[in-house]
Image: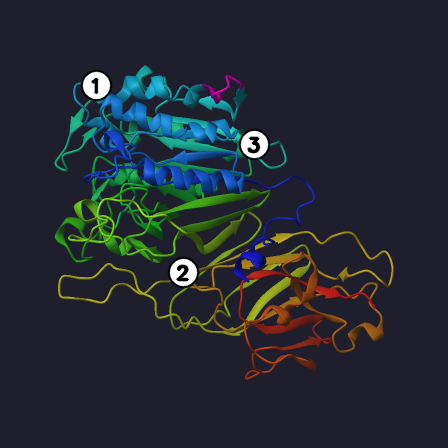
């Protein structure tokens, strides 16, 4: 049911422009023996090929790979990784990678700069060539901070995608060593031009006035604060160069960046990260592994976090799984679907996939990818952080005369992440991010036989746990406008809080519940009403229902 419901959250409603999708895949390293000879030159083709097919089936427009494209960084390995993207290109899908730290460790190849630029000229032009020599272009407005250094051309880069009514900007920041600048710090990584060196260019590309796109996404290989790694993109640990961090965070927040997307950690992790000065916040999405390597979170009280872990609010986490994400851009709304294999719990490196002593160690299984979670944000909505054990009743939003409120319900989740402490702790409690967003209602009533929406359309996400379809039980209320409603419309079942079913038709919202008894109340909601109860409060001009799923909702009068 979850897949059917969320398919309509930000799609099929917009009348202005067609939604479109892009994919994001994590680090792709092969780090163990290869008895099946399926993963040459430290590139996990046996994993990449399976993920590629998922992107092709989903009809994404392009894929972004978040660095560490091979394990050893040698030229032949990087060439092999570029060839692995050709099935995407042959399907008319663009491929936009950037360097990770493993691209800087190759043997005498100038930190992988020349081979990267040779393999991926599209990072400067958006031009692609299929195997049959057909050409196509993905994106426009390509830019790099060449005023800082010509070496950054096509390494740090940005581009736009989408038509004028549904466009997004992508800003990719490469801080790794280059022939013209190398800084090897205490973490053992070879950095180049810093975030601070590039900040003027970053800010210019993010600028919400000049960019003329509703949506903007920022990428870099290293997290702002990671789970297993303790290095960052700020040339050191999480406490390094706080002034750089504050400027970078402030630039993102001021310009409407909602997601910072990265790799490096080989773990699916969503967090809200605060800047060192506490004035800016961003949702960080660390990508699941596309490798034979998986990391485990380090204890949160380890000294090398330098006390910075309190800047992180953990939202969702999945460890030891191969996964990928698909982003849907639909005007003001962005929805993310995270998929991973339904087995999970893979072992790492020499024990991949199932552990030492297994006869199939080193042989990649056939994955069965399933949707594990969906979440969203909207530029015309709001976000609410709901810790475990607290009420959802703070969730309230208004859009062009329609008021939506959660009247009752509690975050009853007991989920924790894997960030234990050194004394054997049980991990951090996960916080839910509940997001609202809106589309204006469809055309007005044409006849008494039409379904009529008496409110704008709310979409509501973030109330479920990873891997589970149903949410906590809660009561949702939406106001309605009484124009064109008749007294008979308020009879049982004719006018209700409504949602979309799997075929895209408006139905009574309680019909999509998991469990409960459908019960109509002519009047206001009262505490204690059970799952499946729904009603109309004519005094407050609102409809309400007790439900247990995320979805899109409106006040609707059904056909007579």
Q: Horizontal and vertical percent for residue 153?
A: 36, 19
Callout 3–callout 2 Cβ contact below 8 Å: no
The span from disc 2 to disc 1 (Cα, nearest Å) is: 42 Å
Name the residue carrying label 1: 109
Question: Does the magenta-highlighted stretch encompass residue 130?
Answer: yes
Mark 3 Cα shell of 10 Å, populated few (<14), some (14-19), many (≥20): some
Q: Secondary structure at mark 2?
A: loop
Residue 212 - label: 3
169 relative to 261, above or below: above
Q: Nearer the viewer, mark 3 or mark 2?
A: 2
Residue at 17%, 18% in the rendered image: 108
Q: Which residues are magenta?
A: 125-134
Work out whether mark 3 precedes mark 2 in sequence or the reverse, and give the earlier one: 3
Residue at 47%, 50% in the rendered image: 337
Mark 1 Cα shell of 10 Å, populated few (<14), some (14-19), many (≥20): some
34 relative to 528, above or below: above
The span from disc 3 to disc 2 (Cα, nearest Å) is: 34 Å
Q: Secondary structure at mark 3?
A: loop
The residue lying toward the viewer, choosing from 359 and 6, is: 359
Q: Secondary structure at mark 1?
A: loop
């Amino acid at each position: 049911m979850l897949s059917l419901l969320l398919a309509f959250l930000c799609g099929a409603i917009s009348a202005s422009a067609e939604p479109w999708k892009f994919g994001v895949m994590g680090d792709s390293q092969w780090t163990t023996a290869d008895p099946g000879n399926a993963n040459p030159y430290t590139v996990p083709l046996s994993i990449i090929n399976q993920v590629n097919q998922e992107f092709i089936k989903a009809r994404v427009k392009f894929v972004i790979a978040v660095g560490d494209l091979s394990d050893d960084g040698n030229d032949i390995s990087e060439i092999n990784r570029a060839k692995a993207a050709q099935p995407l290109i042959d399907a008319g899908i663009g491929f936009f990678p950037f360097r990770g730290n493993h691209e800087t460790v190759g043997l005498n190849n100038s930190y992988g700069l020349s081979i990267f630029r040779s393999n991926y000229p599209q990072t400067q032009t958006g031009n692609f060539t299929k195997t049959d020599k057909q050409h196509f272009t993905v994106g426009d407005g390509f830019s790099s901070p060449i005023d800082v250094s010509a070496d950054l051309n096509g390494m740090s880069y940005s581009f736009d995608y989408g038509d004028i009514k549904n466009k997004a900007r992508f800003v990719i920041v490469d801080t790794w060593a280059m022939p013209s600048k190398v800084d090897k710090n205490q973490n053992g990584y070879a950095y180049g031009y810093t975030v601070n060196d590039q900040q003027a260019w970053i800010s210019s590309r993010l600028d919400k006035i000049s960019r003329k796109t509703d949506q903007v996404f920022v990428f870099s290989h290293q997290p702002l604060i990671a789970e297993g790694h303790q290095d960052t993109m700020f040339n050191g640990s999480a406490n390094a160069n706080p002034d750089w961090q504050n400027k970078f965070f402030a630039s993102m927040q001021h310009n409407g960046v909602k997601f910072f997307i990265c790799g490096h950690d080989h773990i699916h992790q969503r967090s809200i990260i605060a800047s060192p000065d506490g004035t800016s916040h961003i949702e960080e999405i660390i990508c699941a592994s596309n490798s034979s390597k998986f990391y485990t979170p380090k204890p949160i009280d380890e000294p090398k976090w330098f006390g910075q872990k309190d800047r992180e609010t953990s939202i969702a986490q999945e460890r030891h799984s191969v996964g990928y994400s698909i982003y849907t851009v639909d005007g003001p709304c962005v929805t993310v679907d995270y998929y991973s294999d339904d087995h999970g719990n893979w072992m790492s490196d020499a024990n991949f996939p199932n552990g030492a002593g297994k006869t199939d160690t080193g042989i990649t299984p056939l994955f069965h990818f399933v949707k594990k979670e969906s979440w969203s944000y909207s530029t015309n909505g709001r976000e609410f952080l709901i810790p475990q054990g607290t009420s959802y009743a703070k969730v309230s939003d208004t859009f062009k005369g329609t008021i939506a409120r959660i009247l009752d319900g509690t975050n009853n989740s007991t989920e924790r992440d894997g960030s234990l402490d050194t004394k054997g702790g049980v991990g951090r409690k996960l916080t839910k991010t509940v997001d609202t967003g809106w589309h204006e209602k469809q055309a007005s009533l044409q006849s008494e036989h039409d379904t009529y929406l008496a409110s704008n359309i709310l979409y509501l996400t973030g109330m479920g746990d990873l891997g589970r379809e149903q949410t906590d039980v809660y009561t949702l209320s939406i106001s309605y406008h009484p124009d064109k409603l008749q007294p008979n419309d308020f009879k049982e079942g004719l006018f209700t809080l409504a949602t979309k079913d799997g075929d895209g038709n408006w139905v009574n919202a309680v019909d999509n519940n998991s469990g409960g008894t459908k019960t109509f109340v002519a009047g206001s909601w009262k505490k204690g009403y059970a799952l499946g109860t729904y009603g109309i409060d004519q005094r407050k001009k609102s409809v309400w229902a007790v439900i247990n799923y995320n979805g899109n909702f409106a006040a609707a009068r059904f056909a007579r």
